[in-house]
Image: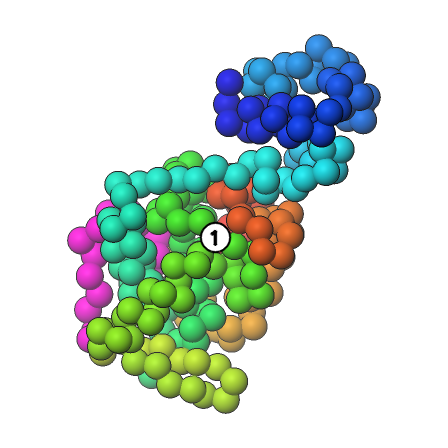
Amino acid sequence: MNSLAERIKERRLARGISQEVVASELGISRPSYIAIEQGSKELTLSQLEKLANVLRTSVSDLQYEVYNLAGDETKSKKYLQIILNCLKFGADKDGKITKTKLAKLAYLADFAWFYTNLEPMSGLAYRRIQQGPVPDEYFRSIDELFESGVVTLETKGTALMVSATETSAPQSELTNSEIGLIKTIAKKWQGKPTADIVDFTHNQLPWKLCRPGEIIPYELITQEDPGNVY
């Protein structure tokens, strides 16, 4: 049984709803619904949304899965390198980028990697918050980079600008393919207003299908149109 099927069954039992009732709400037969709970039948996006409503939960709750790489320390180190490489390739000509735009580039790289490889680049959990999608780790990472002198921060109007103190960026935790994807995404958005990338990410399915504060499942990006991944 897959994790999605397990969560569906758990939520149904917790609500005290019979398989017959759920099947009726979905407009399918009871045997078809049983196959869903057994993990042998896939749900369409519309069925998943309807099922979440029936079970009084969210799509992200049903699909959420924590991805763990080689441990928190390695995961954090890799995420720092993702940020620094997004900064290296995505900063404007003056070497600066808004803190919000930098977070967006890291998000796009992480989820675009999952779109192609069905595994995340960082393994961190992203949340749907106003500045997001962004992992809680992002804010701590920026503080760490600033305190260690790797980046500088300055206010420009209402924006916080980030710039690197060195031209090179560490890449020991990243594969050549990961670096290539980061560079492609960063170059695509280089020089464009922060508002544009914010609007872009907020019009993607991962953002639209989650409620404020919820974890955004990586799996949702696989349902996005290819031209709208980054």
The amino acid type of the residue labelled 1 equals Tyr
* Left or right: where 7 falls relative to 46: left
Q: Position of residue 194 (x, y in %)?
A: 51, 73
Q: Which residue is mark 1?
A: 126
- Is disc 1 surrounded by few (<14), some (14 to 19) or many (20+) residues within 10 Å? many
The answer to whether residue 227 shows anywhere in this view is no
* Left or right: where 20 falls relative to 105: right
- Figure check: 192 above or below 182: below
Residue 200: in magenta span: no
Residue at point 35%, 49% (across, down)? 122
The answer to whether residue 99 shows anywhere in this view is yes
Residue 106 or residue 51, whichever sits in front:
51
The mark tally for this picture is 1
As drawn, the residue found furthest toward the bottom would be: 157
Residue 227 or residue 13, whichever sits in front:
13
Segment tinted magenta in the rendering: 166-183
Residue at point 81%, 26% (across, down)? 25
Task: Indicate the secondary structure of the residue bearing disc 1.
Answer: strand
- Figure check: 182 above or below 3: below
* Left or right: where 134 falls relative to 55: left
Residue at point 22%, 65% (across, down)? 169
